[in-house]
Image (tube, helix red, strand yellow):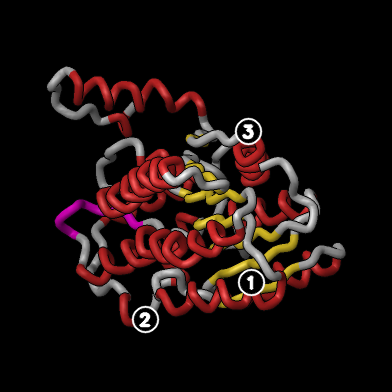
Amino acid sequence: MKHFNDKVAVITGGASGLGRAMANRFAKAGMKLVIADIEEKSLEETVSSFESQGYKIIGKHCDVSKAEDVEGLAETSLKNFGSVDILCNNAGVSVTGRAWEHSRAEWEWAIGVNIWGVINGIKTFTPIMLNQDSDGHIINTASVAGLLSLPQMSVYCLTKHSVVTLTESLYHDLIEIGAKISCSVLCPAYVPTNISKSERNRPNHLKDSRIKTEENIRMEKKLEYAVESGKISADNVAELVFEAIVENKFYILSHPRIKPTVEERVNDILKDKQPTNTFSK
């Protein structure tokens, strides 16, 4: 995809972090924006801020785990702007803990947002973009946790591995039918965003009643510190996303230094070794 002026970008989780940074980059390229988020106050502030800069933008409250919400997002996009040229399935949540400790509600919450959110986006928007018969691109936000398997991150790793393999299969499907649209998977490492504070948006019916141990709390603080200390900004990642769309690049790794760690995991598989704890390195 080479031309962006007056094209339309739809971004879930677009009111903060990576989503807002992507929206800003697309706006600077002359695109119209449809920003979806579950956090209404941040959504209103984002829309107001972009409008004050003269950008064309619409905000839509959306729980991506619900198919009807994502379908409503598509209807709003088409009603207001007539097309969808870039789709960023970006909304996500993060939880930590031992694999056996998580409640069913915690699994359902993370799987609903991180996996079903992407599924709903693909199922709803891909036919629309194909029927337009024009260049377009789908960005699915995974994580380096989708390329690695880490202790105390089973829920998050499971969901992000799912996003990676789903996007790889989507890529092959689009190639096989000669589609004009393509796709990429974004796998960032630590970027200063609010991902470690995901709890703020958990629905009441999926609240976790388990009592967290001191170890759980230490892990949460460790992750929060790692995220806040990230040296690559959300704006940096957004620029990489934009470049990947222009160059039709599939894998977007914002932190290239993670590649040897990914290679180590693959070598464990190929050499029939026990899994290496890459998180301790």
Visible residue check, residue 242: yes
- The label nearer to you, 3 versus 2, is 3
In-image side of 211 versus 133 (left or right): left
Front in this rendered view, residue 165 or 217:
165
Front in this rendered view, residue 159 or 31:
31
Other residues around mark 3 within 10 Å, as few (<14) / some (14–19) / many (≥20): few
Q: What is the distance, in whole Å, between disc 1 and disc 3 at their CAs? A: 25 Å
Residues at discs 1 and 2 in contact (Cβ within 8 Å) = no
> In the image, is residue 41 above or below residue 10?
below
Residue 181 position in % (x across, y down): 55, 48
Work out which quarter of the rendered image holds the N terminus and state it: top right
Q: Which residues are magenta?
A: 95-101
In-image side of 52 versus 196 (left or right): right
Residues at discs 1 and 3 in contact (Cβ within 8 Å) = no
Q: Which residue is mark 2?
A: 204
Q: Is 187 covered by the magenta stretch? A: no
Front in this rendered view, residue 200 or 262:
262
Which numbered marker is on residue 77? 1
Residue 20 position in % (x across, y down): 65, 57
Q: Main secondary structure of the magenta part?
A: loop
Q: What amino acid is labelled 2 in the image?
A: Asn
> In the image, is residue 113 above or below residue 76?
above
Q: Which residue is mark 3?
A: 247
In-image side of 212 versus 12 (left or right): left
Q: What amino acid is labelled 1 in the image?
A: Ser
